[in-house]
Structure formats: structure tokens, C-alpha cells
Amino acid sequence: MVQEALAIPWRRREDFAYALPVPLALLAGLMLAWYFAGELLRPLSGWALYLGYCLVFAACFTLFAVHCHRLVLLAPPRRLGALALPAWSRRESRFLFWLVTLWLAYMATVWAVLMLFASALSWSRELEAWFDQVQLAAKVPALYVVARLSLVFPATAIDRVVDWKWAWRASRGNGWRLVVVVTVLPWVVSQLVGFLYRDEPSAAEVVLITVLGTALFALEIAALSIAYRELTKDEPRA
């Protein structure tokens, strides 16, 4: 699956080069603006500002991810000429809805597991001392839930109307494989990109590495598209 996720963007690099530059520029530009404006924004920092950034990031990521999923799953015809300009439609709105919903599901699962730990062990200084480890352990079932439900993303990108029940049923027996695709693969990619940073990087290095790291999102999205295709290939189509 990972090998195919690497191969598809390379084999169809002209299609990716036509469809993705504008969404890529929006996403990378937002990340760079947040990075370079850090000193200026620090006096204004707060939950409202960070929430606003997260929502704009989610919208830019939606444009990028929907294009990637459609390139892998629908293989639209190649076009020549000017770069494709992203458009926002009901499809992107549904995709963004699922992004926000699955993030809330992740947070709710982490909170529920933490409450189970707290009630089972009773709050104490010992529990406080181990809180970081308990919190890390709580993320495992949360990531599993998100991975099982993540099939809604490629399905929504190709205009299927799906829900949580469908995603949970379609991913039955493949939950941990999806955890690898949705969590382990992005972590590995982020670590590889992180190795390129050095202490006190120049502005040019920050720009190049940020653009590279953002472009590599396409590999992770392609891997999820391939997983969706394999897990739903035997489903009857209306």
C-alpha cells in the first residue's frame, strides 16, 4: 500500500502538477505565515486566534486533500494550459464537516478514556505523576476510532454520501492497518522532514522544507485512498 502510494504521484506527476499547486501554495503559505508571524502574534495569542488558524488550515487542507483523493480514485483526464484553480462546493463543505467531526470524536475518546483511568485508579498524586503516560495511553483508542472512521474522507471526496456506521462497517477487521495508514505513516513522514531542519535555519530553508513537507501530504492521502479502494471494491454500487 505504501509502495503504491509512492508510485501513483510519480506515475501521474503531470496530473498532480496541474491539479495541486494552488491548494499546495495556500496550505504551505498559511503555515509559513503562521511561522514567520509568530513573534508578532505572540502578544495576541489565545484560544480564539489559534482556533481561527486551525479552521483556516482545515479549509486549505480540505482543498488539497479532496484534489488528491479524486486524482487517485477517479483519475480525471489530463488537462493542459493554466493551473487548476480550486473551487469550494458542497463536497468540500462535507469534507470539512468530517474533519471537524472526527477531531471532536478524537478529543471525546481521549477524554472518556482519561475519565475511566481516573475513576479506576482514583485521583491521587501518583496518578498526577503518571498523567503524561496515561494521556499517551488514552490516545491509542482515540487514534483507532479515528482510523476506523477515516474512510469517510475518500468517500466524500468522490461524492459518496456516507456516515459513521458505514465507515465502521467498511473498516471492520482492518482497524490497525488503517491506524498505520492514518497515524504511523504521517508520523514517519514528519520525522523524515524534521531531520532536514537544523538549528537556526534560514528563511529560504524554512520555506523549502515547509513546501516539501506539505507536498508529502499527498503520499499520506494517496495511501488512504488506496485503502478505501481496496476495502470497498466488493461493495455494491447504487
Image (cartoon, grey):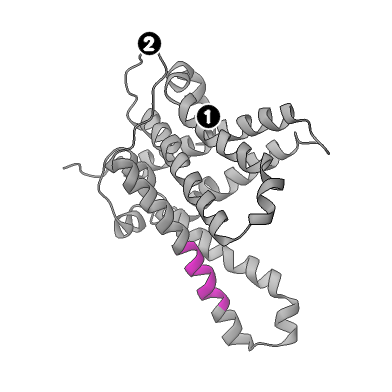
| Residue 107 visible here | yes
Mark 1, residues whose alpha carbon is within 10 Å: few (<14), some, or many (≥20)? some
Residue 225 badge? none
Look at the picture and state if 16 lies above or below 155.
above
Residue 203: x %, y % from top left: 74, 30
Q: Residue furthest top?
A: 81
**Residue holding disc 1:** 25
Q: Residue furthest right?
A: 199
| 235 sits to left or right of 45 | left
Amino acid type, mark 1: Ala
Give the position of the C terminus as an image quadrant.
Answer: top left
In the rendered structure, which segment of residues is drawn in magenta? Answer: 105-114
Look at the picture and state if 82 lies above or below 162.
above
Residue 29: x %, y % from top left: 57, 34
Look at the picture and state if 146 lies above or below 66.
below
| 87 sits to left or right of 137 | left
Residue 80 badge? 2
Mark 2, residues whose alpha carbon is within 10 Å: few (<14), some, or many (≥20)? few
Q: CA distance from mark 2 to mark 1?
A: 19 Å
Looking at the rendering, which quadrant does residue 114 occupy? bottom right
Residue 235: x %, y % from top left: 25, 45
| 40 sits to left or right of 174 | right
Q: Residue at x 40, y 32 (%)?
A: 67
Q: Residue at x 62, y 30 (%)?
A: 212
Looking at the rendering, which quadrant does residue 92 occupy? top left
Q: Residue at x 39, y 25 (%)?
A: 85
**Residue 101 counted in the magenta span:** no
Magenta segment main secondary structure: helix
SS at badge 1: helix
| Residue 155 visible here | no
